[in-house]
Amino acid sequence: MTRLTSWHRLNRRICPSPLDPIRHPLLTQQGIQLWIKRDDLLHPQISGNKWRKLKYVLRHALSEDARGLLTFGGAYSNHLHALAAAGRQLPLATVGLVRGEAGSINNPTLSDARAWGMALEFVDRQQYRLRHTQAYLEQLAYRYPGYRIIPEGGSCSLALPGVAELWQELPPIDELILPVASGGTLAGLLSARPAGTRLRGYAVLKGKDWLAETVHRLFPDALQDPGWQLQLEHHGGGYAKCSAADRIAIAQLADELCVPLEPVYSGKALLGLFRDIAANHYAPGSRLVFLHTGGLQGARSQHNSKRSGRAK
Ligand SMILES: Cc1ncc(COP(=O)(O)O)c(C=O)c1O
């Protein structure tokens, strides 16, 4: 049995996610057709955009006989959680560099990651900021020889082809809408955007000055592509910030649509989409798909973080 056999086994278990029509009075009133692509249902642990982004990164790591995988994330990171789950299944050793102090953080995300064998190393904010610098990455490569280092959020060039495969599961539509943070999912979708389908990314953080550049860096052809845009006004105050009123609006939307949502990614972006539809930013007759990128595991930690003041 080669190391790749376990990857093929995992890959075979992952079926196309459902594409569900959404009914809502606002959509009827505005003459919009909306479907939701339920990537949150792709896999119990490696869900949402995580499997799509990690798929070929993992295959490559196995094929080059990597000793393990090392990555970065916040204490509630869906990416850390998914990588730990994938590492356990393949199996591949995993290391997570977590922003924060060991003693002050314990939550379901990190407990799962630990239980699945991920070695967690806590680093302060100052050190965490170094995660893109060559010298720091070289230091880590020295400390963890043979480990493949995966950027925060899993957004790297090898993430693009796995994300691009999503188009094979969609019918012809006018626009695909998705939450955006580190830009890898948007870049992957842009790399195979069908002519005639636009992409609109809802930034879930304050990305005004740098987010488009991040997408260009991951997929340089995006610079000349007029078929996409970023919505930068719905970040709600910044990453993982959400007012009490927006929290209620997201919970109400989840009830009305019978779709589980969380306030950091899918809920924040979908609320932004509904507000933009109400403000006539989408033409009547449009056929839209909203990509549910998962992240529901993080919502388990939301209750704790609300108490600790993380999400306001
Ligand atoms: C659940 C979820 N949705 C959306 C995103 C944003 O995707 P990206 O970082 O590729 O822009 C993330 C972060 O990776 C995420 O965890």
Image (spheres, rainbow, N blue to C red):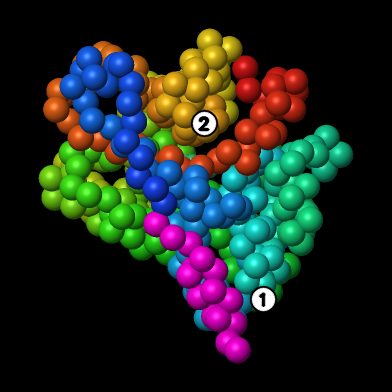
Mark 1 or mark 2, which has the lower sequence index? 1
| Residue 183 visible, this orientation | no
| Numbered badge on residue 179 | none
Residue for point 67% across, 29% down: 302
| Residue at 50% over, 57% down | 51
Q: Which residues are magenta?
A: 1-16
Residue 139 horizontal/vertical position (percent): 67, 63
Confirm or reject: label 1 Cβ below 8 Å from ligand 1. Answer: no
Q: Dot 2 corresponds to which residue?
A: 261
State the separation of the CA atoms marked 1 and 2. 36 Å
Q: Is residue 140 above or below residue 307?
A: below
Task: Name the main secondary structure of what is drawn in magenta.
Answer: helix
Viewer-nearest of labels 1 and 2?
Answer: 2
Identify which amino acid the numbered label 2 is placed on: Leu
Secondary element at tag 2: loop
Q: Quadrant of the C terminus?
A: top right
Which amino acid does the dot numbered 1 rest on?
Answer: Arg
In the displayed orientation, state which residue is furthest to the bottom.
1
- Mark identifier at residue 67: 1
Q: Tell me what residue is drawn at x 29 percent, y 16 percent.
A: 26
User: Mark 1: few, some, or many residues within 10 Å (few <14, many ≥20)?
Assistant: some
Query: Is residue 163 visible to the viewer in this orientation of the structure?
Result: yes
Please tell me whether mark 1 sits on a helix, a strand or a loop.
Answer: loop
Q: Position of residue 172 (x, y in %)?
A: 18, 47
Nearer to the camera, 211 or 190:
190
